[in-house]
Amino acid sequence: MKDLGEREFRAGQLSTHYFGRLVRDPAEMTDLPAASRERIAGALLPSLLTPVRELACDGGATRKNLWRLHDGALVESVLMGYPDRVTVCISSQAGCGMACPFCATGQAGLTRNLSTAEIVDQVVWFAGETARGALPGCPDRLSRVVFMGMGEPLANYNRVIAAIRRLTDPAPDGLGLSQRHITVSTVGLVPAMRKLADEDLSVTLALSLHAPDDELRDELVPVNQRWKVAEVLDAADEYARRTGRRVSIEYAMIRDVNDHPWRADLLGRLLSGRLAHVNLIPLNPTPGSRWDASPKDVEREFARRLRAAGVATTVRDTRGREIDGACGQLAAAEEMS
Ligand code: SAH
């Protein structure tokens, strides 16, 4: 503000518009001098995300945006409304370097890290839409954020942590969301998981396990070649111990690949007694992939065996299939066209 020749307290006013009122249109910032509103907002709230496509399904309760960033990079975010909560799934990188073969984003490789502002702005954008009643029959306050869009959040560590602080600090410094309602999902970068446990944050950690044995996980989550199942589960355990927060073990059910009864039993043995629960994700098949979702009866049997081993298990609600809801599908389709 000083560089713009404005009084310092204007910074708090602008920040209150952005984080507190979810307003970014200078015309609505009537407490700023009329003559300099445009200039202030233009300089300090540049538009970071340009919508390329905006899609809706599930009767308007699921909305997916494909954004173009200032340098042409593409990222996606998905808004999901439920009767009791509104969740946004955001991207932390354009593309991803982790190369998981069942994931559309993994196929194209990493373009670049997102900045803290580019991460935060996805949430602020959808929080504004939600407050303006975009999701019929849902609360008008966005309450949850999951880092399950494009990218590996722990590979963009400092910017993701800074974004979490902006999302959780109270206005005017941030959006004032609860740390417990923020989920960071990782392929299992062990040193970064241990660092996260040191941050004194109470965010939820989700670990994309997808296989209980190293032989298969080496293929499905290639970073397993560096940090094995046992090491990654130890790091998850440490996170749970340090934060008291149950870790969510993500397991995409892929037909005839990782859905065998013996793998359910092995996973049950690995997890029983740990502060963890399993979230089974029906695979969202990506175009051109040889893999498909497990049949429902196989999925039920897999969940039954985990529960029999004493492991809390849920099956992920699938949203947005007809709008290429799975990670990276929309961006891949846009690059193609
Ligand atoms: N890189 C992080 C976060 C982004 S992916 C991670 O891997 O955890 C979010 C989740 O979606 C991960 O569990 C990932 O394995 C899963 N996923 C990716 N593609 C999928 C697909 N086609 N079907 C089902 N789940 C998928």
Image (cartoon, rainbow, N blue to C red):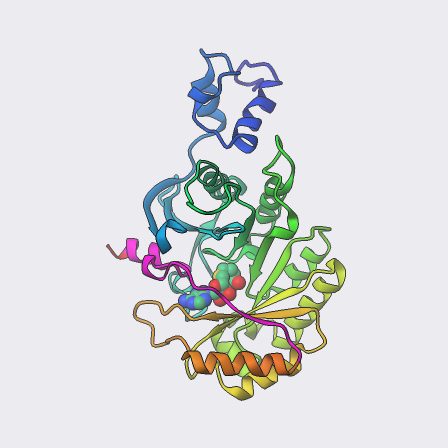
Q: Is residue 240 above or below residue 86?
A: below
Magenta segment boundaries in residue numbering: 310-335
315 magenta-colored: yes
Q: Position of residue 225 (x, y in %)?
A: 55, 75
Residue, x 70% and y 60% (percent of image)? 245
Question: Which residue is found at the position 57% from the left and 31% from the top?
Answer: 20
> Is 87 on the left-hand or right-hand side of 74?
right
Q: Is residue 119 left or right of residue 227?
A: left
Magenta stretch containing residue 255, yes or no?
no
**Residue located 45% across and 56% down the image:** 150
Residue lying at the far bottom of the rendered structure = 262
- Relative depth, front residue between 84 and 165: 84
Q: Is residue 74 left or right of residue 275?
A: left
Residue 324: x percent and y percent?
Answer: 34, 59
Q: How many marks?
A: 0
In-front residue for pair 290/139? 139
| Of 161 and 223, the residue lying toward us | 161
Question: Which x, y percent locates residue 13?
Answer: 57, 22
Question: Would residue 67 be found to the left or right of residue 81 on screen?
Answer: left
- Rendered location of residue 268, percent (x, y): 62, 81
Residue 299's place in the image compared with 325, above or below, is below
> In the displayed structure, would residue 3 be above or below residue 260?
above
The residue located at (67%, 67%) in the rendering is 236
In this rendering, does residue 98 appear at all?
no
Asked if one can make out residue 161 in the rendered structure from this viewpoint, the answer is yes
Please tell me whether residue 161 is drawn above or below residue 13 in the rendered image.
Answer: below
Looking at the figure, which quarter contains the N terminus? Answer: top right
**Quadrant that contains the C terminus:** bottom left
